[in-house]
Amino acid sequence: MEYDVAIIGAGVSGASTAWQLSRYHVKTALVERWADVGFGVSKANSGIIHGGFHHPVTSLKAKLEILGNLEFEKLQYELGFPFERNGIVVVAFSEEEMAVVRKLYAQGVANGVRNLEMCGRDRLLELEPKLNPEVVGGFFCPNGGTIEPYRYVFSLVEGARRNGVELCTGFEVTAAENDGDCWRITAADGRTIRARYAVNAAGLFADRVSALFGGESFTIHPRKGEEYLLDRNSPARPRRVIFPVPTAHSKGVLVIPTAEGTTMIGPTADPCENKLDTSTSADNMQRILSLVRHMVNGISPRDLITSFAGLRPVLDSEDFYIARSEKAPRFIQVAGIQSPGLTASPAIGVYVKDLLKQAGLTLVEKEQIQYELAPRHEARHETPEALDRLHKTDPAWTHIVCRCEKVSEAEIVEAIRKGHTTLDGIKFYTRAGMGRCQGGFCSAKIMKILSRETGIPMEELTKKGGNSRLLGGRLGTLPVESQKEETL
């Protein structure tokens, strides 16, 4: 259990760093406190690839956002996650809002963002017919897009593991000791690893991890964002990501055509004290519906299929904090990675790799890297002829478990064999349970497959690890006396 580098946190920042280090002769451990990778900040991300115009290029977040944006076609080719560069429109509904739009456009031009286009009403409606016809103007950023954030993290980690990175889940760091040449890192369950260098990519808990390592003192302030998902058949689904004029603390409430066919509306941006509070509220749902109905035609509460919330890890500076620690030796801080952290993540991985090199880590490139993952079959995307061929190799390909998203038993088995052993892990890997019925039809079937493949008793299966058990006990037949009482 000795490594050159230990990366603490397997969200987009930690996973991107692991992917970068996997190209070198460096023994790397990626440790994650939750039961699966991406289960922290990253899983509730809006999935937007930002365009590089919201922040001045003097900030670190803007520099890394612009560099990261350019990498996604290459990464998609290498790793095979859902991604679409469908563009962003920023819209204004008054002349006062148009003044802000012009400033954003000028900032994007100053940042070097390519192909920005100022638009009048007619051009915006041509680009996005679902817009409210009362729109006054705005601009179009064609290099924006959407991505499925959990699949992106899974792909990065799977690629890193194929090239030698070791993953430890359920590893909540509770202690770190420096013996001069190495960090001894201990988890809550008693497991221990040793590493010469450590990277703090712990998201909402980066302040606690920094304190454990004797690093800089700072505070992560959670900022809650509630999101609401519309059915894939909603008539409100737009072609582009639609941004309003931003506020002081938020890019605003958006309408997002997700990479896998549904439509997302949100998020909010509210201060929050509890780093584990992912509750949603009816009041915020009504507030979001009101805001997005002003921008887009066809939004209906009847199309809402679920709600969720994520927490942004915000620093007082509002910028990213990525630097070598000045207090703890061989310790790299990667903190305050809020929006646009997903877009910036490919560049964050490179930036952290370079900081490790500056700190003394020897980086020797491997002679050969496994860049491309094996082609992944998904029943919903296969032709009838292709499904027939897959059925001949394994009949489970035509046993559809999730009807809403058309997910087969074979895909669920594949997810389990790749290490996703919670109901949420399987959902994020396959989309089973993400459709209209939100798992009402398929959850029990998935649990049976999961228990069969892993040997885990049904009553011990969890939604997301830890104490999130799905059953309160074993189901059985009532005693005869109880049956009589029930009949009476």
Image (spheres, rainbow, N blue to C red):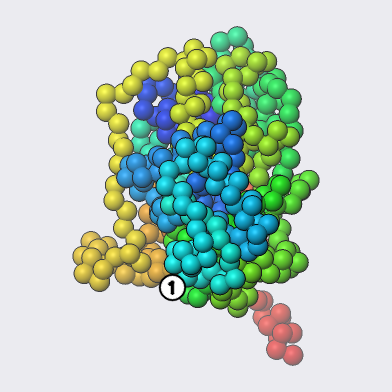
Label 1 SS: loop
Q: Which residue occupies 59% across, 23% down?
A: 323
Q: Which residue is mark 1?
A: 403
Q: Indicate the quadrant containing the C terminus: top left, top right, bottom left or bottom right.
A: bottom right
Check the image and name the residue furthest to the bottom. Answer: 488
Confirm whether residue 172 shows in the render: no
Front residue of 452 and 1: 1
Front residue of 217 and 172: 217
Confirm whether residue 393 shows in the render: yes
Q: Which residue occupies 69% across, 51% down?
A: 247
- Where does residue 98 sit, x and y in percent of width and height? 62, 56
Front residue of 101 and 352: 101
461 displayed left or right of 165: right
Q: Against 225, is 6 above or below? A: above
Q: Which residue occupies 68% across, 69% down?
A: 290
Front residue of 483 and 272: 272
- Where does residue 334 sit, x and y in percent of width and height? 59, 30
- Where does residue 367 sit, x and y in percent of width and height? 27, 24
- Residue type marked 1: Arg
Place residue 281 in its image quadrant: bottom right
Q: Against 105, is 217 above or below? A: above
Check the image and name the residue furthest to the top. Answer: 180
Q: Which residue occupies 58% across, 66% down?
A: 135
